[in-house]
Amino acid sequence: QVQLVESGGGLVQPGGSLRLSCAASGSIYSINTMGWYRQAPGKERDLVAFITNGNSTKYTHSVKGRFTISRDNAKNTVYLQMNSLKPDDTAVYYCKAEWGYFSEYDAWGQGTQVTVSS
C-alpha cells in the first residue's frame, strides 16, 4: 500500500502564490510518475501537471508559465509551486502517484482545497 499526504492549500488573493506538497509513504520500490490534478465544484477532475522519474514535465495549457512541478525522489515528494493565481484556479487539488513496470498501480491523496478570492 502507498499513502499520499498533501499539504499547502489555503485561501489566497488573486495574483498570490501557494506551494503544494505531496509526500508518498508505504511499500514503494520506485515511483514512476507523480502528478497533480484538480476538481472544481460541478466539474470533472482534470490533470494540472505531471513529472516523470526522469524529470520530464507536462502542464495543462491554462497553468503554463505560472505553475511549476518538481520532485524530490529521495523523499518521494512532489511539489507544485503556483504563482499568479487566478480565481479560476480555485479547486480541490489531488496528488497522484504511479508505479510498477507498466505504471499499472496508482494511488491518490485525499485532496487539499485551494481558494483564490479577494
Image: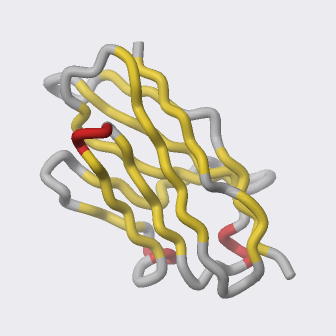
- 53 or 21, nearer to the observer: 21
Q: Residue at x 58, y 84 (%)?
A: 84
* For residue 8, side relative to residue 73 (left or right): right
Q: How many marks?
A: 0
Q: Residue at x 28, y 42 (%)?
A: 33
Q: Position of residue 42 (x, y in %)?
A: 79, 52
Give the percent coordinates (x, y) of residue 13: 77, 80
Residue 17 percent coordinates (x, y): 60, 76
**Foreground: 46 or 25?**
25
Q: Nearer the viewer, residue 76 or 110?
A: 76
Quadrant in which residue 11 is drawn = bottom right
Give the vertical position of 62 relative to 80 (above or below).
below
x and y percentages locating residue 95 in the rendered image: 50, 43
Image quarter of the C terminus: bottom right
Q: Relative to residue 78, is residue 10 depicted above or below? A: below
Q: Is residue 99 left or right of residue 106?
A: left
Q: How is the image coloured?
A: secondary structure
In the image, is residue 18 above or below residue 8? Answer: below
The quadrant in which the N terminus is found is top left
Instruction: Name the residue rendered at 65%, 49% in the picture.
Output: 44
Whether 107 is drawn above or below 10: the answer is above
Q: In the rendered image, which quarter is residue 69 located in?
A: bottom left
Q: Residue furthest front?
A: 75
Residue shown at the point (47%, 43%) measured from the top left: 22
